[in-house]
């Protein structure tokens, strides 16, 4: 039987704005409010007789009887749960082409137990059975029969919401603190910022040294025509001090970035191993459902800042085989973890629980509790990771090849280079400049991809990070970079003091 309302009438009914909220939890609370205050329940129900929660068109109003008779559907989302609790009270009027404006005009008859027998045997009994196995929930009256039913024996939507919230409060949807959480997220962000800072500082120093060298060469050429040799000598000495100072700072930062690169590789490898344990471990199925974004962030963290630091060291010719091996291991583990999560893991998989009765379907209340964090509906994180990982893997592969070819002289390649780029040709310089520019663009784009994950985790409406968690992993994560930072700061302060002393000696 098709819906008795036309598209225009349905559009008019939808304009009442009963379901104008963007949050599913708000919608659930709205449902309770409108039920308890005798609203236009016909408009409320008819609005969702057109589209279901996933946007599919429901062409027949009586299909709701099928939706609301299957526990796995009822417990799929709070929208279905709220509407199925309304269904028995108005379904008889849909078949007659009528929708009542309130409880009275709907002809609600509390003595007609047959209309709600199905829901009475499913929703409350499933919630009660589940709640009794949760200590915090069992100790409260929220999921008792007296709270789930009205005095007329009808399901109490308000009571059902209170019971559901109690179950959700017991099941705190925080991520695995071994590799997630607020302090580890800050640690991941610190790693990215340190890599960016090292890249910017070292390349700035390198550029300034190059420009200063050119300026010194011009000054040296004009020394013979200088009428004041003492002034020229003073300028040359000051210039030499400036170059030595730049060189010293460059050495300190290079040393710091070398140690930082080793540390970040070992740190990424350890976190990626923890990710594998979470993915393939014993009782991690439920927690892992909420760790998908963190797993992708860890994978990105083992690629982007590692590649950025390696590229910085290679530009300044400070790379060793040790760095290449560590980077390769980190890259392989990060790529394997990230692509496995992308291909095999999905946040919208039904959550199961040993405590959830099998007769109530495959979906436990935890499935709806976790909807507070709705990144699972958004495919942008997955797409962003795959795109960034592919480009980052290609860049790291090219860096490894670059390192290998620069140390292994292959006669055929040397001859090919001499033929394509003869001595004195500017083409080779242009090609190198283009390749370096492309590498920088790729690194910055991949960094933006990683920052996209940070934005999701820090600025989403619903947070899944426990700010009160001070576990071992959280403490290690927030302090792991302090050694590199403090050591660099200590040497920089000492270098600045020496520079001041040398400056005073020149002016005395």
Image: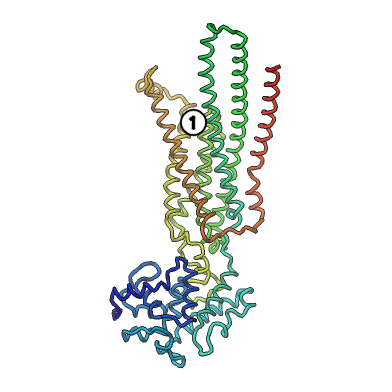
Q: Up-down: is 257 above or below 136?
A: above
- Locate residue 40 relative to residue 36 in the image: left or right: left
Residue 240 appears at what percent x and percent y?
A: 60, 18
Q: Nearer the viewer, residue 77 or 238?
A: 238
Give the farthest residue toward the bottom: 111
Q: Secondary structure at mark 1?
A: helix
Q: How has the structure been colored for display?
A: rainbow
Q: Residue at x 52, y 23 (%)?
A: 210
Indicate the quadrant where residue 50 lies: bottom left
Q: Residue at x 32, y 75 (%)?
A: 10
Quadrant (top left/top right/bottom left/bottom right) for the N terminus: bottom left
- Locate residue 420 relative to residue 490 in the image: left or right: left
Quadrant (top left/top right/bottom left/bottom right) for the C terminus: top right
- Locate residue 403 relative to residue 247 in the image: left or right: left
Q: Up-down: is 268 above or below 169?
A: above
What is the crowding at mark 1: few (fewer than 14 residues within 10 Å), some, or many (at least 20)?
Answer: some
Q: Nearer the viewer, residue 476 or 99?
A: 99
Q: Residue at x 46, y 64 (%)?
A: 349
Q: How many marks?
A: 1
Give the farthest residue toward the front: 227
Residue 386 appears at what percent x and percent y?
A: 43, 49
Q: Which residue is mark 1?
A: 403
Q: Nearer the viewer, residue 477 or 2?
A: 2
Residue 209 appears at what percent x and percent y?
A: 54, 23
């Amino acid at each position: 039987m098709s819906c008795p309302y036309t598209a225009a009438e349905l559009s008019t009914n939808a304009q009442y704005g009963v379901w104008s909220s963007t949050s599913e939890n708000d919608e659930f609370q709205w449902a309770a409010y409108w039920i308890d205050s005798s609203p236009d329940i016909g408009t409320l129900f008819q609005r969702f007789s057109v589209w279901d929660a996933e946007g599919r068109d429901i062409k027949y109003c009586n299909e709701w009887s099928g939706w609301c008779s299957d526990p796995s559907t009822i417990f799929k989302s709070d929208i279905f749960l709220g509407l199925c609790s309304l269904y028995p009270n108005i379904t008889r009027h849909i078949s007659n082409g009528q929708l009542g404006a309130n409880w009275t005009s709907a002809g609600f008859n509390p003595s007609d137990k047959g209309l709600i027998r199905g829901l009475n045997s499913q929703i409350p009994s499933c919630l009660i059975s589940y709640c009794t196995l949760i200590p915090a929930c069992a100790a409260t009256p929220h999921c008792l029969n007296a709270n789930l039913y009205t005095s007329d024996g009808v399901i109490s939507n308000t009571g059902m919401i209170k019971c559901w919230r109690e179950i959700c409060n017991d099941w705190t949807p925080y991520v695995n603190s071994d590799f997630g959480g607020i302090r580890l997220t800050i640690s991941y962000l610190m790693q990215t910022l340190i890599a960016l800072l090292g890249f910017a500082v070292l390349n700035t120093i390198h550029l300034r040294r190059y420009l200063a060298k050119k300026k010194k060469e011009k000054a040296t050429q004009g020394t013979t025509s200088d009428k004041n040799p003492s002034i020229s000598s003073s300028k040359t000495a000051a210039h030499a001090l400036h170059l030595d100072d730049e060189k010293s700072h460059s050495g300190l930062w290079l040393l710091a970035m070398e140690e930082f690169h080793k540390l970040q590789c070992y740190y990424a490898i350890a976190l990626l191993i923890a990710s594998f344990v979470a993915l393939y471990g014993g009782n991690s199925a439920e927690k892992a459902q909420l760790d998908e974004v963190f797993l992708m962030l860890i994978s990105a963290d083992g690629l982007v800042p590692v590649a950025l630091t390696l590229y910085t060291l290679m530009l300044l010719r400070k790379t060793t085989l040790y760095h290449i091996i560590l980077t390769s291991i980190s890259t392989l583990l990060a790529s394997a973890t990230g692509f496995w999560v992308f291909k095999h893991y999905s946040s919208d998989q039904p959550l199961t629980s040993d405590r959830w009765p099998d007769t109530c379907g495959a979906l436990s209340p935890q499935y709806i509790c976790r909807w507070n964090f709705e990144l699972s509906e958004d495919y942008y994180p997955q797409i962003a990771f795959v795109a960034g990982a592919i480009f980052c893997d290609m860049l790291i592969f090219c860096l490894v090849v670059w390192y290998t070819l620069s140390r292994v002289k292959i006669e055929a390649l040397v001859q090919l280079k001499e033929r394509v780029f003869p001595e004195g040709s500017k083409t080779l310089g242009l090609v190198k400049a283009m390749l370096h520019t492309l590498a920088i663009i790729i690194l910055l784009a991949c960094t933006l991809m990683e920052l996209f994950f940070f934005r999701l985790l820090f600025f989403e409406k619903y947070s899944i990070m426990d700010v009160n968690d001070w576990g071992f992993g959280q403490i290690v994560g927030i302090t792991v970079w302090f050694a590199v930072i403090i050591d660099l700061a200590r040497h920089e302060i000492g270098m600045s003091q020496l520079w001041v002393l040398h400056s005073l000696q020149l002016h005395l």
